Amino acid sequence: MRILNQDKEESIRNLLILLTPEEAKELKDDLELLLSQDLSQGQNHAHINDSDYQREITIAIYTPNNYTSFNDKVKKLISNE
């Protein structure tokens, strides 16, 4: 698991996420969709937004074989931690 604060471009070790029931369902549905797809085809992430689009969670699934498709910051986070 890697957690990146994209605003500050730094790793986070401990995170609390508070979701409404609707947001939790969207997260669950997106995770199930990602897990059902072939990760080598580039479908490796999803975005979950709050109702006002003021906050966003980006989730991604990576493996040793597919993380090179991410941007340089994410590749560095995965490979260095």
Image: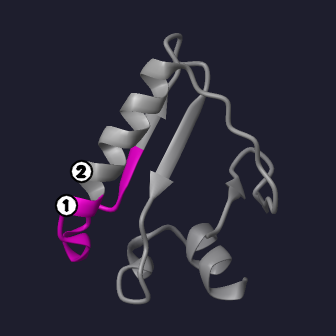
The residue positioned 56% from the left and 33% from the top of the image is 56
- Depth order, front residue of 36/68: 36
Label 2, label 1: how far apart the Cα atoms are = 5 Å
Q: Position of residue 5 (x, y in %)?
A: 73, 51
Name the image quarter holding the N terminus. bottom right
Q: How many marks?
A: 2
Residue on which disc 1 sits = 36
Task: Describe residue 53's horizontal placement relative to residue 4 as left or right.
Answer: left
The residue positioned 58% from the left and 69% from the top of the image is 74
Are there few (<14), some (14-19), or many (20+) residues within 10 Å of tag 2? some
- Depth order, front residue of 36/47: 36
Q: Position of residue 69 (x, y in %)?
A: 38, 74
As drawn, the label of residue 56 is none
Q: Amino acid at mark 1?
A: Ser
The image quadrant that residue 47 belongs to is top left
Q: Amino acid at mark 2?
A: Leu
Name the image quarter holding the C terminus. bottom right
Q: Is residue 38 one of those drawn in magenta?
A: yes
Task: Describe residue 52's horizontal placement relative to residue 10 as left or right.
Answer: left
The image quadrant that residue 65 belongs to is bottom left
Mark 2 touches mark 1? (CB < 8 Å): yes
Q: Position of residue 22 (x, y in %)?
A: 43, 20
Q: Secondary structure at mark 1?
A: helix
Q: Secondary structure at mark 2?
A: helix
Q: Is residue 21 above or below residue 61?
A: above
The residue positioned 75% from the left and 41% from the top of the image is 16
Task: Describe residue 20's horizontal placement relative to residue 12 as left or right.
Answer: left
Residue on which disc 2 sits = 33
Q: Is residue 9 above or below residue 63?
A: above
Are there few (<14), some (14-19), or many (20+) residues within 10 Å of tag 1? few
Q: Position of residue 4 (x, y in %)?
A: 69, 58
Q: Which residues are magenta?
A: 35-46
